[in-house]
Image: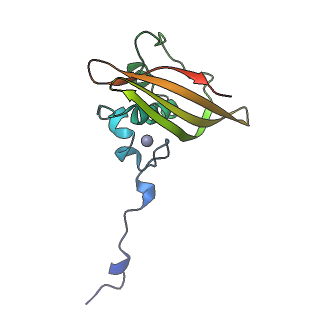
Amino acid sequence: MARPDSSRAPRATTCEREACPCGGPAFADCCGRYLEHGDIAPSALALMRSRYTAYVRRDAPYLLDTWAARTRPASLDFDDAPQWLGLQVKAHAQHDDAHAEVEFVARYKVGGRAHRLHERSRFERGEDGRWRYLDGDLLE
Ligand SMILES: [Zn+2]
């Protein structure tokens, strides 16, 4: 005898899989690979997205680890960190094997007011094959 509810077995729902803050698919399949499993971001774009996600998650070790040594701050604190609302990538240009730029807009909220951070970030790839954030220009 068929059980009347068998067709309504619990389905895997999206709420079981945390969406990635960068706007990608599930965190585990997106930036989670780099933040939590130590995978190497294959492009400056992937690294940039993972760094945005690291800001959302306040993952200072990851941010420092993916920052070029010559521009990296000694430490990061999140005492005055804004609430990040979303990321929109505008452009990604890889100039050669070791240099790339990513232009993005990140929206955030401070004290109840929404703001936009529009930046063109520069990335470089070290001899270890890892992309790292170098610096950036604010565009507005
Ligand atoms: Zn992501």
Query: Quick check: 72 left or right of 114?
Result: left
Query: Quick check: 56 left or right of 45?
Result: right
Q: Name, please, the residue furthest toward the front.
A: 95
Q: How is the image coloured?
A: rainbow
Image height of 70 relative to 82, above or below: above
Could you say which is closer to the camera, residue 47 or residue 92? 92
Could you say which is closer to the camera, residue 45 or residue 92? 92
Residue shown at the point (43%, 58%) measured from the top left: 14
Could you say which is closer to the camera, residue 44 or residue 34? 44
Residue 23 position, x and y percent, is 50, 46
Q: Quarter of the image holding residue 5?
A: bottom left
Residue 44 position, x and y percent, is 40, 31
Residue shown at the point (38%, 43%) measured from the top left: 30
Q: Quarter of the image holding residue 38?
A: top left
Residue 36 position, x and y percent, is 34, 34
Q: Quarter of the image holding residue 80?
A: top right
Ligand 1 appears in which quadrant? top left
Q: Name, please, the residue furthest toward the bottom.
A: 1
Residue 117 position, x and y percent, is 63, 31
